[in-house]
Image (cartoon, rainbow, N blue to C red):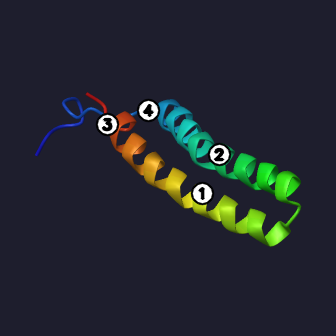
Amino acid sequence: MLSDATKSKLSISEIVLKGTIIAAIITIPSIMAFLLSWFILEDFMVAVILGGIIHFIAMGFGLKISKKILIKK
């Protein structure tokens, strides 16, 4: 087993900062897609569906980004 001195850990502030960045990457595009489609199309249900689709796409990108930035070298 490795001792605590040899393990590379992320500090709490690094985890919070990187988690906030990932949350913004996931949330902002879906909210913007929802609001823009709601104002342009003037149909709430279509806007909800488009926002949900964009949200799941952004979650896929967030997963890939989190694997890259949450690993400490």
Indicate the position of residue 60 as horizontal and vertical percent values.
44, 54
Question: In 3D space, how far apart are the residues under numbered discs 1 and 3 (Cα atoms)?
Answer: 24 Å
Q: Determine which residue is flagged by label 4.
A: 11
Horizontal side of 11 relative to 31 (left or right) equals: left
Query: Which element type, helix, strand or loop, lies under badge 2?
Result: helix
Q: Are circles 1 and 2 on residues that touch, CB within 8 Å?
A: yes
Question: In 3D space, how far apart are the residues under numbered discs 1 and 2 (Cα atoms)?
Answer: 7 Å
- The disc, 4 or 1, on the residue closer to the chain's N-terminal end is 4
Q: Amino acid at mark 2?
A: Pro
Question: In 3D space, how far apart are the residues under numbered discs 4 and 1 (Cα atoms)?
Answer: 28 Å
Query: Which element type, helix, strand or loop, lies under badge 3?
Result: loop
Q: Is residue 40 above or below residue 56?
A: above
Quarter of the image where one finds residue 73: top left
Tell me which residue sits at (48%, 38%) in the image: 15
Kindly identify which numbered label has been placed on residue 71: 3
Question: In 3D space, how far apart are the residues under numbered discs 2 and 4 (Cα atoms)?
Answer: 28 Å
**Label 3: how many Cα within 10 Å (few below 14, some 14–19, many 20+):** few
**Label 2: how many Cα within 10 Å (few below 14, some 14–19, many 20+):** some
Q: Amino acid at mark 1?
A: His
Camera-nearest label, 1 or 3: 1
Q: Amino acid at mark 4?
A: Ser
Q: Determine which residue is flagged by label 1.
A: 55
Camera-nearest label, 4 or 1: 1
Q: Amino acid at mark 3?
A: Ile
Q: Is residue 39 above or below residue 71?
A: below
Indicate the position of residue 8 as horizontal and vertical percent values.
27, 32
Question: In 3D space, how far apart are the residues under numbered discs 4 and 3 (Cα atoms)?
Answer: 12 Å
Q: Residue lying furthest left in this view? A: 1
